[in-house]
Amino acid sequence: MHSFFDPASPQARAVAGLWWWMFGVGMVIWFGVFAVAMYAARQPHGQRGPDDLEHVSPERHRRMERVVAGAVFATILILCAFLVYDFSIGSVLAMHPKRALTIDVVGHQWWWEITYEDPNPSKRVGTANEIHVPVGELVQFKLRAADVIHSIWAPNLGGKKDLIPGYVSTLWFKADTAGVYRGQCTEFCGMQHAQMAFYIVAEPPVKFAGWLAAGSIPNPPPTDSLLLHGRDVFMQRGCASCHSIGGTDARATVGPDLTHFKGRAAIAAGSLSNTRANLTRWIQNPSALKPGVRMPALELSPGEMNALVSYLETLK
């Protein structure tokens, strides 16, 4: 369930608390105004005078003025209280922790590039559209856009934040409940904006540490003849012009890093489950599944397609 009504971090819980207070107070005010309106509609408005107009007595007029003034004063107090509450939540969300797991997130049309920072370049882990984080630890996203304005929002874990070309912004949170949480680009960024999703996998620290350590280790080179043929297809038929795979000569950065591609639950930025059938369809004609996508279709023979897909499925 991807909804801010099911918060899984202190930051999301604070935003949800603010919403529920606003909703509750707003409903009380609505019912109060409705009750007063119904009461006023049933009361006589005044006495008809010689001029055939209704006149309100001075006492009733002053009483009505006091009621209106009291309502205005109460409205100002409520708005001021929510303003203070809102700023307090904003200050919490805008904090910059000194120590946190730092993850670079770059928005592209229409996918997410993910890089785990490390002082040792050989230990940096790159992936796409799927972010693993440890439960109970602070995580900081360093956000930027590669092309147009994007916006990132994982409702269960934190607030929305824009990614602006040429500018680095930050977003931080701490997942306190293990699970898989869906996120989405929430700033219109082109034809496939609606299909620019990502997943955050919150897992115990030990499991996360194992995943991160494995992420910096390339897969062993294939030895099977079919897989060797698939790797050759990848290197020679255009895939290596856009993608990178650790341990090979494919080091392009136009498209997602595929080093541990099969370890992801979805492809095409959350559009399709990562199955052999979907992968085959995606390679054959990505524009048919995601119109406007920049990945070109590959004209491969059935044997080449089978070998390529088989090779990609070993990248775990």
Image (cartoon, rainbow, N blue to C red):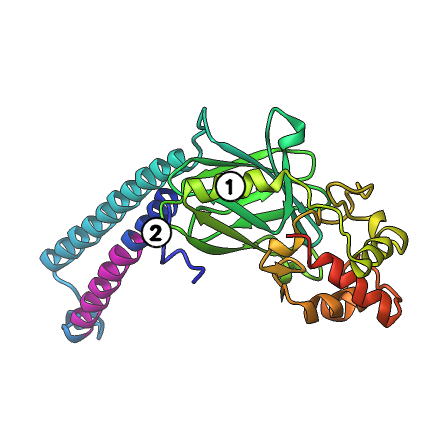
Q: Position of residue 161 (x, y in %)?
A: 53, 43
| Secondary-structure class at tag 1 | helix
Outermost residue to the left: 59
Instruction: Identify the image quadrant of residue 117.
Output: top right
Residue with the mark numbered 1: 210
The type of residue carrying mark 2 is Ala
| Secondary-structure class at tag 2 | helix
Q: Position of residue 157 (x, y in %)?
A: 43, 48
Magenta residues, dominant SS class: helix
Quadrant of the rendering where the N terminus is positioned: bottom left
In the displayed structure, 85 sits above or below 297; it is above
Residue under the image location 77 percent in, 42 percent down: 253
In the rendered structure, which segment of residues is drawn in magenta?
A: 22-41
Asked if the magenta segment contains residue 28, the reply would be yes
In the displayed structure, 164 sits above or below 183; it is above
Instruction: Identify the image quadrant of residue 82.
Output: top left
Residue with the mark numbered 2: 16
Marks counted in the figure total 2
Side of 51 relative to 204 (left or right): left
Could you say which is closer to the camera, residue 246 or residue 80?
A: 246
Q: Position of residue 5 (x, y in %)?
A: 36, 58
Q: CA distance from mark 1 to mark 2?
A: 32 Å
Residue under the image location 35 percent in, 43 percent down: 10
Could you say which is closer to the camera, residue 128 or residue 155?
A: 128
